């Protein structure tokens, strides 16, 4: 009897330890590319950029198995500049708080390359689906990135022209349903946290995706609230799909945008259409797409600000972690449009851009 009880106790302890296993992973990316911009009236820009295909980053992610199919996890991810120390001007103030000059210090880059400027969230997953809270990618941006042949990176990034639907949402809560025959539903809210105007700056979204075999299809909705006239209001409706035939992968996306930009007196009416391909070639992948931006907003002066973008790129893996890449894109602005060709971390300086670089993931 005693031996049976001892064996049961040992088995219970081992089972409990196994169900509570946790892991923490360190990961990152170093992306450095030579970028040549042209088409700016002030001249060309030639530079080394950090984060052409995707922002250079350092991150930690972990998961704890709580048993019964329940898991707790987290992700903390910061960007950094791999090409420079990013000098920054900082104001110098006197004891009364008045600015009396500036000094230069070094810091992380700005934007998604900024210190803790990427993701930071905690998650809980189980039979009910997945819940997440913190700073995280929006449903609309994830849909756009999945359909874009360039993954919203390289010179051909679709969000050079197409609204990114919030990209990353601060103070947000996100829920995904369990997958049912390939279908997953999602909802999210990012709180603006404005005292006395709790709806101001609030971001909400929803989506439905289907992924099975060679097919991906996704619909997403994004809404940036503009209560009491603070900031800009915008709504995006995005429908995209890909189909992988093996010898070629087809990409197609449409997005309708409405809203009222800051300081504007008219409502936006924009339709963006994307068509693209990914082709396995010589051990790598050839990517190309075309985007048509149809601004149907009736401005009182200046006409409708339309634009087109054409892009081509190639990435070749040297190993499982390291690849070389190159891409070129050109935007044709019309009727006073001012779109520029950027990449995953930069907005660019002109209407044409070429890049060549190396990316290493660890």
Image (cartoon, grey):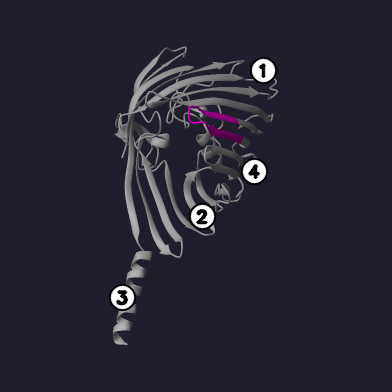
Q: Name the front one of labels 4 and 2.
A: 2
Question: Residue at position x 44%, y 59% from top?
Answer: 71
**Quadrant in the rendering for residue 112:** top left
Q: Which stretch is magenta?
A: 239-253
Q: Is residue 171 left or right of residue 16?
A: right
Lower sequence index among marks 2 and 3: 3
Lower sequence index among marks 4 and 1: 4
Lower sequence index among marks 1 and 3: 3
The answer to whether residue 322 of the structure is visible from this angle is yes
Real-space Cα distance between discs 4 and 3? 60 Å
Real-space Cα distance between discs 4 and 1? 28 Å
Question: Residue at position x 46%, y 54% from top?
Answer: 123
Q: Which mark is residue 10?
A: 3
Disc 4 residue crowd, few under 14, some 14–19, many 20+, Cα 10 Å: some
Q: Is residue 329 above or below residue 268?
A: above
Disc 2 residue crowd, few under 14, some 14–19, many 20+, Cα 10 Å: some
Secondary structure mainly formed by the magenta segment: strand
Q: Are discs 1 and 3 less than 8 Å apart at CB?
A: no
Q: Which mark is residue 131?
A: 2
Q: Is residue 159 left or right of residue 256?
A: left
**Quadrant in the rendering for residue 67:** bottom left
Residue highlighted by disc 1: 303
SS state under label 3? helix
SS state under label 4? helix
């Amino acid at each position: 009897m005693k031996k049976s009880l001892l064996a049961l106790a040992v088995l219970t302890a081992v089972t409990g330890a196994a169900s509570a296993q946790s892991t923490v992973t360190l990961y990152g990316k170093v992306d450095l590319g030579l970028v040549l911009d042209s088409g700016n009236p002030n001249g060309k820009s030639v530079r080394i950029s950090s984060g052409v295909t995707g922002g250079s980053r350092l991150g930690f992610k972990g998961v704890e198995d709580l048993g019964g199919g329940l898991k707790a996890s987290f992700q903390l991810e910061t960007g950094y500049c791999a090409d420079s120390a990013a000098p920054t001007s900082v104001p110098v103030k006197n004891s009364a708080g008045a600015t009396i000059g500036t000094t230069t210090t070094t810091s992380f880059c700005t934007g998604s390359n900024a210190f803790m400027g990427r993701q930071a969230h905690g998650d809980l997953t189980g039979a009910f689906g997945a819940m997440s809270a913190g700073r995280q990618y929006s449903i609309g941006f994830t849909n756009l990135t999945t359909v874009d042949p360039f993954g919203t990176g390289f010179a051909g990034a679709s969000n050079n022209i197409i609204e990114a639907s919030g990209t990353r949402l601060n103070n947000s809560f996100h829920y995904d349903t369990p997958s049912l025959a390939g279908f997953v539903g999602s909802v999210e809210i990012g709180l603006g946290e404005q005292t006395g105007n709790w709806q101001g700056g609030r971001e909400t979204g929803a989506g439905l995706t289907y992924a099975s075999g060679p097919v991906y299809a996704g619909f997403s909705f994004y809404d940036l609230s503009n209560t009491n006239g603070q900031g800009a209001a915008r709504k995006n409706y995005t429908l995209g799909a890909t189909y992988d035939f093996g010898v070629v992968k087809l990409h197609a996306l449409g997005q309708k945008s409405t809203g009222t930009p800051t300081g504007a007196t008219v409502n936006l009416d924009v339709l963006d259409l994307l068509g693209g391909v990914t082709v396995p070639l010589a051990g790598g992948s050839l990517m190309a797409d075309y985007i048509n931006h149809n601004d149907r907003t009736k401005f009182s002066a200046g006409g409708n600000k339309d634009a087109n973008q054409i892009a081509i790129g190639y990435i070749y893996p040297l190993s499982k972690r390291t690849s070389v890449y190159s891409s070129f894109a050109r935007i044709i602005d019309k009727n006073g449009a001012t779109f520029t060709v950027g990449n995953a971390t930069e907005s660019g300086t002109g209407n044409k851009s070429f890049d060549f670089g190396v990316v290493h993931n660890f």
